[in-house]
Amino acid sequence: MKPPALTAAALAERFGLTLRGADRTITGVAALASATPEQLSFLANPRYRAQLAHTHAGTVVLCATDADVFAGTALLTENPYVAFAKISALFAPGQESIPGIHPTAVIDATAVIDPTASIGPHATVGARSRIGAGATIGPGCVIGPDCEVGDGCLLVARATLVTRVRLGQRVLIHPGAVLGADGFGLAMDAGRWIKVPQLGGVVVGDDCEIGANTTIDRGALDDTVLEQDVRLDNQIQIGHNVHIGAHTAMAGCSAVAGSARIGRRCLIGGGAGILGHLELCDGVVITAMSLVTHSINVPGEYSSGTPLMDNRSWRKNAARFRQLDRIARRRAGDAKDHE
Amino acid sequence: MKPPALTAAALAERFGLTLRGADRTITGVAALASATPEQLSFLANPRYRAQLAHTHAGTVVLCATDADVFAGTALLTENPYVAFAKISALFAPGQESIPGIHPTAVIDATAVIDPTASIGPHATVGARSRIGAGATIGPGCVIGPDCEVGDGCLLVARATLVTRVRLGQRVLIHPGAVLGADGFGLAMDAGRWIKVPQLGGVVVGDDCEIGANTTIDRGALDDTVLEQDVRLDNQIQIGHNVHIGAHTAMAGCSAVAGSARIGRRCLIGGGAGILGHLELCDGVVITAMSLVTHSINVPGEYSSGTPLMDNRSWRKNAARFRQLDRIARRRAGDAKDHE
Amino acid sequence: MKPPALTAAALAERFGLTLRGADRTITGVAALASATPEQLSFLANPRYRAQLAHTHAGTVVLCATDADVFAGTALLTENPYVAFAKISALFAPGQESIPGIHPTAVIDATAVIDPTASIGPHATVGARSRIGAGATIGPGCVIGPDCEVGDGCLLVARATLVTRVRLGQRVLIHPGAVLGADGFGLAMDAGRWIKVPQLGGVVVGDDCEIGANTTIDRGALDDTVLEQDVRLDNQIQIGHNVHIGAHTAMAGCSAVAGSARIGRRCLIGGGAGILGHLELCDGVVITAMSLVTHSINVPGEYSSGTPLMDNRSWRKNAARFRQLDRIARRRAGDAKDHE
């Protein structure tokens, strides 16, 4: 696809930015370090401010406070990352999907496929499932029975909706994601595990995004629920009957155990874990690889873990962690001695 | 599928429960908070005891000690979760699999498929592999060469058995699971990695369950082994030559490095890690996100990590962890001064 | 496949080993504990030295310093693991791939497939993608548009290259791996997330290995890069624009957040995490489940976390971690008192 040619002035008008300097034609977007004079770049992370002086980018989106360092055409805004996201979307190639059902796809006779939907090669759609208008089911996807895929959804490739999964509109699912597998429900009976049937489903709100190889189990009785605009990175595990509030974002490899309830606008760091049956209120931030072991009812940032050290120092300090209670007790004893 | 209608009295007789109150017809199962008078619910987790007073469930399975709070029809038992699991299985729809080989499946000429097995759309079965009676190979599954799938196994969809994987009877494998990939065996030779061939296989005992996107590598020389009734949740990683004892259950995102040996009836918490070549005796419990760095020969519960705190407090305390050895030494010095 | 029969003397000559004892025919390789007199085994990990006295292996590859414990035919070398890797490769069955395109594969009209490549059942190859000489695309793989697969690559099964993924030569990708999915780029705009288009690709150098269900996102603007001979185990997550130096190896379930730069010959332990935008110099070792929160510019071993303890002791010590800053301050106060 040949990228469109736009001008800095046109972008300024379209997205409400302030143009400073000469107008320029823009043929694409790039990072500060690699952009050419025909390309537009941006500065959002102060970490990269020093690159402004050396960039070959002809046009840069940035805050007014950073603009003095840059000699070229500037598009000024209070939120350069948002403006850049919108601009670069104009240059992004979309998934090339053709309406209709690929001849290798296998569609159950009771499934209902909107004529504007695209069903890719080697996809399967199960009994009583419905695929909405403009939705794309990429190659190798498996849609089991009793699922609903809303209008404009995009399942890139090799995603699986096992059963009773209902997606809202414009949900984006990356390859390898599995929604609606059995929750991990087991009861110990006479020395053996017996399986607790998982009778619920998964409900995913509008505009959610589900990362590659992420798994979301279906509920045991009620549904597992993601409200609208929830954003899940890759390799996240969501247990059965979890409820995640709108606009919450979770970074890669984080995990939520069964029946936990996460509020709206939370940010869960990479590799973080949340134990089952807990509740997190709105606006909670969990830093990377922390373990949440109790409910949280005050918004704010929470952490666990210890700092990284060279291994020799770490061994010494970690060994003392074993003695921490004893050390603290002795300390308290000393304090008494001093009294 | 229309759910069957059963009565409380019939369930009591079938599963050895004590009926208290009027007999009732039951058309389904549901959670306490959402059940209707025609549905049966249960109380197993004391956390939800308060819901008993408000539930609309007509029938509830629970302990005698909880029964006074509930006015409706009660089915009394010492283990309500087990009884509920058995009852709800009567209402669970099974996977709709039809015996025979789907026309889009690709079966090697040397593979042997039992006529009662079901091979789904776009599945492949490799050379010399055998699929047992009543087994279901769901859509998109890849069974490589020299594999065995026992009677009554269910591979839901898109599971992969790479090579030399032998499943016992009634093994349940969820989508995206990969069994029998190369173990991570590398040797450094003149500044470059060379690959150590992985010549073993994977042996999975009867009644095991393997979660979505879980990976179990095949052995380097001998096999990787799961004894019977091992239950693995989603996104678990099992390294080559690991041996897991019968009835052990592992929660999501946990991982076991190569050649570790885990006993019977162990419980491994979510996100926990077990280093290579270690041995855990029977009956070990590892709490979530703990790292096991040495062998364990005493049954019981083990943990590592630090508690969750607000980030400001955590930063202060974590900074002190760096000084822990110094603090402890000074303390010891003080103690000497006092002598 | 019938394994070849070789002799100890022939192996000694081929791989530069010293033969001690009688020459023997070798029909296969096995672990010390299970080898038969016709098989060759090895000792590399001192943990298994005691097995030398009892092994039935006819031939063992080992260090001269260990040779006195073993009475049979010995092949002496300074690096038994490397020698064993090379020898056992002679006995390893290769993937049985036949050049040509399976009739069920779906190939875009603009894709270019080398006639010596093998495209398996139910694979798809997208627009403008190229598959090199001798490459194998296993069953169920999805190669999206604008990808390049170098000569001799092996995608075992069900791997996905989403778009703009360029593989060097002899890259090995295990099932379920997803390369080139969208990086996790989001900007908060008026209370909702908007997606930052991910316009870059993924570049993978020669001789890299990518584990089962591992995910490598494509870059936001520039590419995500793995230099040559990088070895990734299963279930690893690599964020967008990460750069990994040559010969670095990462163990299972580790993760690297966006734009981090990892040097050459690093070893990243299982479950370890590396935060975004950090730099690790060459030769850094991170132990299992450590979290890297700052850049590292000195080679060596680094760790975080606390040691495993029985849960009762852990609870006591972990509770004191909450008070660590207070304890340290009091200590400092005491020290002052003593002055």
Image (cartoon, coloured by chain):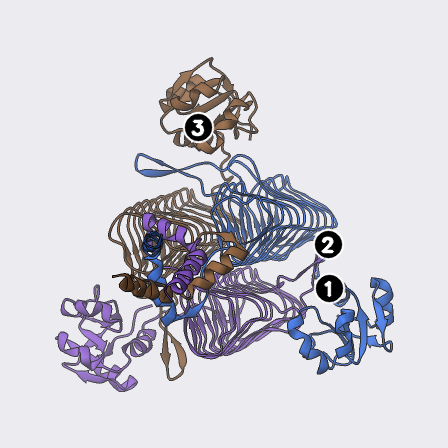
Chain colours: A brown, B purple, C blue
- Outermost residue toward the top? A22
Q: Which residue is mark 3?
A: A87
Q: Nearer the viewer, residue C123 or B144?
A: B144
Q: How many marks?
A: 3
- Give the x, y percent position of residue C177: 56, 54
Mark 1 neighbour class, 10 Å CA radius: few under 14, some 14 to 19, many 20 or more:
some
Q: Tag on residue C99?
A: 2
Q: Quick check: marks 2 and 3 in contact, CB under 8 Å?
A: no
- Give the x, y percent position of residue B217: 58, 65
Q: Nearer the viewer, mark 2 or mark 3?
A: 3
User: Is C251 above or below relative to B227?
Assistant: above
| Dot 1 or dot 2, earlier in sequence | 1
Q: Nearer the viewer, mark 3 or mark 1?
A: 1
User: Is B13 above or below relative to B46?
Assistant: below
Q: Chain of mark 1?
A: C
Mark 2 neighbour class, 10 Å CA radius: few under 14, some 14 to 19, many 20 or more:
some
Q: Is residue C193 left or right of residue C107?
A: left
Q: Which residue is mark 1?
A: C85
